[in-house]
Image (cartoon, rainbow, N blue to C red):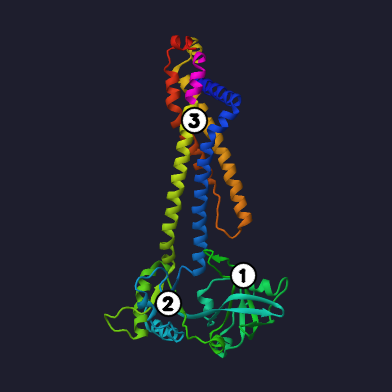
Amino acid sequence: MARFLYEFIESFRIAFAQIRANKMRSILTALGVIIGIVAVTLMGTAIRGIDTGFQNSLAMLGEDVLYVEKWPWGPVEDWWNYNNRPNIRPRDAEALNRIITATPNSLLEIAVPVVGRGSSVKYGDAKVSNVFNLGTTADYVRINSVEYQEGRLFNDTEAGAGREVCVLGYDVAEALFPGRSPLDETVIIGGHPFMVVGVFAKQGEFLGLFSFDNQVVMPLNAYQKYFGTRRGGQLRVKVRDKTMLIAAKEELTGAMRRVRGQLPGERDNFSINEQQAFKAQLDPVKSGIAMAGLFITGLALFVGAIGIMNITFVSVKERTKEIGTRKALGARRRSILMQFLIEAVSICLIGGVVGMVVSYLMFIGIRIQAPNFPVEFSPDLVLVSMLVSVITGIISGFTPAYGASRLDPVVALRYE
């Protein structure tokens, strides 16, 4: 064991001496490994970041909330069928809630109507355009777990009376009232005055498509008074137990058919959407990134492995006499094999470390330039990258190292 340990340490010393003696050659040899490690690391970072951003976005939708809408979340084939469906009306929520209350052991808790449109919000000379203006009832607090930066949601009395009160999204409040509280101030929404009673805490964006911080929530009756609800909206239905989502969806389908007065055999004239619809659309994107990343990674590592194998063969040829001398003095085959194998693995490890540093610097650059872009650098990627480097070195260096260990010392000593 002591002899093996000595040979192992000595092989490392010889390998690094050779790498130092041929710095440029070693750098060029490791370049393919560096590119491969950068590719595999960035691919893992992108996929992990997409997962994190997606899960955060889904959390904003609510794992225990079903969305009753005119259109499904996803591509449709029969466009005219969906277009001719009747709009989801706020009063559908009242009928649906009566059915939920009358159903023993219902899996549904409450239905909340939500309508919305884009509008501008002004305060003095400050103005924010394209703000999502949302009208709903005081029960909105039961289906939305968002916290409040300050203030509160409007209450039942304010909602029932259609009071001109509102809750601002974080970005809207920051744009209109930088550095101070907007509570009890009056803003102009779509040309109509509303008093601010609350500000939502920062929530972030949904898959980079929609910002939850760029919205204003007001009582449904006030919304109807000033903006109307001809275009319809959606019903957000809270489920009592999110583990029973499939059964709850079936119950909701039956209840909505009763609300709509649909006969048996008629196609549903509404869609029930949930988080999984987005996940089904995202999975092919993740698979595409993974396939492209694996192809680029495999190609780069293949080229790097060929380069390392070639250089190891050259190194064996250059040091044939040295090998003959060592074997003539009693060096074992495993010692020669270990020496060249460690040299190949060392080059790969150096390439892996450099690749990891480059990847991390690129990760930092992305975080600085696009702070909202979901990227995540994990320690797991470091371990995977180092493992890939070692495996590449072993595979590419084994054949020339094995050939060196099998050299006849007499022939090797005569080599010119």
Q: SS class of the residue under badge 3?
A: helix
- 349 in magenta: no
Label placed on residue 395:
none
The x and y percentages for residue 310 are 47, 27
Q: What whole-number distance in Å separates the C-alpha atoms at marks 3 and 1?
A: 54 Å
Q: Residue at x 42, y 22 (%)?
A: 402
Q: In terms of image quadrants, where is residue 138?
A: bottom right
Q: In the rendered structure, which amino acid carries the disc numbered 1?
A: Ala
The x and y percentages for residue 241 are 42, 70
Q: SS class of the residue under badge 2?
A: strand
Q: Nearer the viewer, residue 8 or 394?
A: 394
Q: In terms of image quadrants, where is residue 267?
A: bottom left
Q: Which marked residue is nearer to the observer: mark 3 or mark 1? A: 3
The x and y percentages for residue 185 are 69, 81
Compared to residue 163, the image places residue 174 above or below, namely above
Magenta residues, dominant SS class: helix
Contact between labelled residues 1 and 3, with CB atoms less than 8 Å apart: no
- Report the residue marked by disc 3: 308
Q: Which marked residue is nearer to the observer: mark 2 or mark 1? A: 2
Q: Nearer the viewer, residue 217 or 25?
A: 25
- Report the residue marked by disc 2: 69
Q: In terms of image quadrants, where is residue 283?
A: bottom left
Q: What whole-number distance in Å separates the C-alpha atoms at marks 2 and 3?
A: 59 Å
Q: Which residues are magenta?
A: 312-322
Compared to residue 216, the image places residue 388 above or below, namely above
* Crowd band around label 3 with a 10 angstrom C-alpha radius: few (<14), some (14–19), many (20+): many
